[in-house]
Image: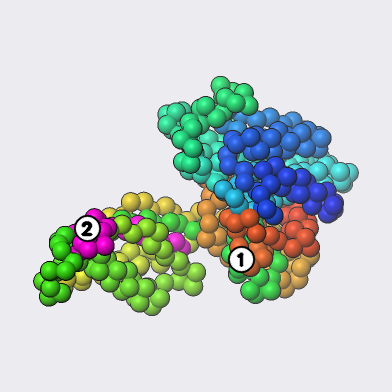
Amino acid sequence: MADIRPERVLSDLRTLATFGAYKSGVHRPTLSEPDIAAREWFVGRLCEAGLDASIDGIANILGKSRAPGRKVLAGSHLESQNHAGWLDGPLGCVYALEAARAIAEDPAIGHVGVDVAVFCDEEGHFGSFLGSRSFIGLLEESEIDGAVNRATGRSLREALKVPGWSGRPRLVIDPARYAAFFEAHIEQGDVLESLGLRIGVVTAIVAIWQYRLIVEGEQNHAGTTSMARRRDAGLELVRLLGAIDTRFPELCGPRTVWTTGRIDLDPGEKSIIPGTAGALFQLRDADPAVLDRLDGELRALVQRANASGRCHLALERISASTPALMDERLQATLDRAAAARAPGRHTRMPSGAGHDAQWLARKLPAAMMFVPSIGGISHHWSENTNDEDIVLGAQVFTDAIVAVLKG
Ligand SMILES: [Zn+2]
């Protein structure tokens, strides 16, 4: 049994929150000045913990254990969304570091170890999961060449030059070295809090199916075109979105979510009936059967609107990922660790957000653990978790890793 040191966990998290501090959260975009400083500080902490730590050519950090025996890989990310919270990402990095320290300090299990990974740009300032995809060998140099910061337009290559990391080789996982990958994260929703629970064991990271809807009507004068003869693309689009919202609850799963993230009207003027309307529509669920069912219904609704309406609707599926399943045996290990430290206060649940673990799951048996988010808030500076929950989570996380390492 490796005991974590609560004050060390909390103080490391609070120190990380000083890099790019913003109100009670942080503003630490990937490879910004505070992000670079946070990475360098974290490497220092890994070295102090006795790990061989380095930063690679895409700003990923790997701290390697010198233990001769079995090893687990654990970690998350350090950068934040713009003007966001202090725990999203850092919590999983510090838990991994604490697991490595607590296990190394326990003479009874000191022959096994934890490697700590920090994946760059999970938050997508430059691209999509660039760090974790690089680490599993699924990132081409050409994608790095083309990656630019969405907000500033600065290229990733330029940004990597500032701290001197460009040109370094990129680290790639050696799957034979590890028994498993573990990532901890704040829940970012309110399931745990609303049920009075303290630990979430992730079953799967949801798939995201993304669609583009285009409605073609007829652009015309808003004053002289009678209601009887107009073909209003905007109205037809809104009708369809309303029909989706009426029909989907009858077919969806318990945690399915759907979002219209964007609506465009063309020409978008106050006295012109829109001739074209477009929307970006998204579905998320961990069950492919549910996604298939809703996809079919979406197509049927579009067909019905086309048959009865005055406009022409086109539906295009832009992308469709598959859910990343977390390893069943590791879920059971996390269940047992949670049951021992917080009996009756844990549950299994899918993750509605994407995480680095979904990529690592392609190479290793992977596990994810959640702690509660106060008010279900994240990606906002007010994001927070109770200290007692942070400490409990660190111990449960470490216990589960110890169980795997003892295998
Ligand atoms: Zn995160």
Q: State the CA–CA distance, disc 2 to disc 1.
A: 37 Å
Q: Taking 75 as reference, is 352 left or right?
A: left
Residue at 71 percent across and 47 percent down: it is 17
Residue bearing the label numbered 2: 276
Q: Mark 2 or mark 1: which comes first in sequence? A: 2
Q: Position of residue 326 (x, y in %)?
A: 57, 55
Above or below for 52 versus 382: above
Please, what is the dominant secondary structure of the magenta stretch?
strand
| Amino acid identity at mark 1 | Gly
Quarter of the figure with residue 311: bottom left
**Most distant residue in the top direction:** 167
Using residue 400 as the reference point, say whether residue 347 is left or right of it: left
State whether residue 194 is above or below residue 118: below
Q: From this viewpoint, is residue 406 visible?
A: no
Query: In the rendered structure, which segment of residues is drawn in magenta?
Result: 266-285
Identify the element where label 1 is drawn.
helix
**Which residue type does callout 2 highlight?**
Thr
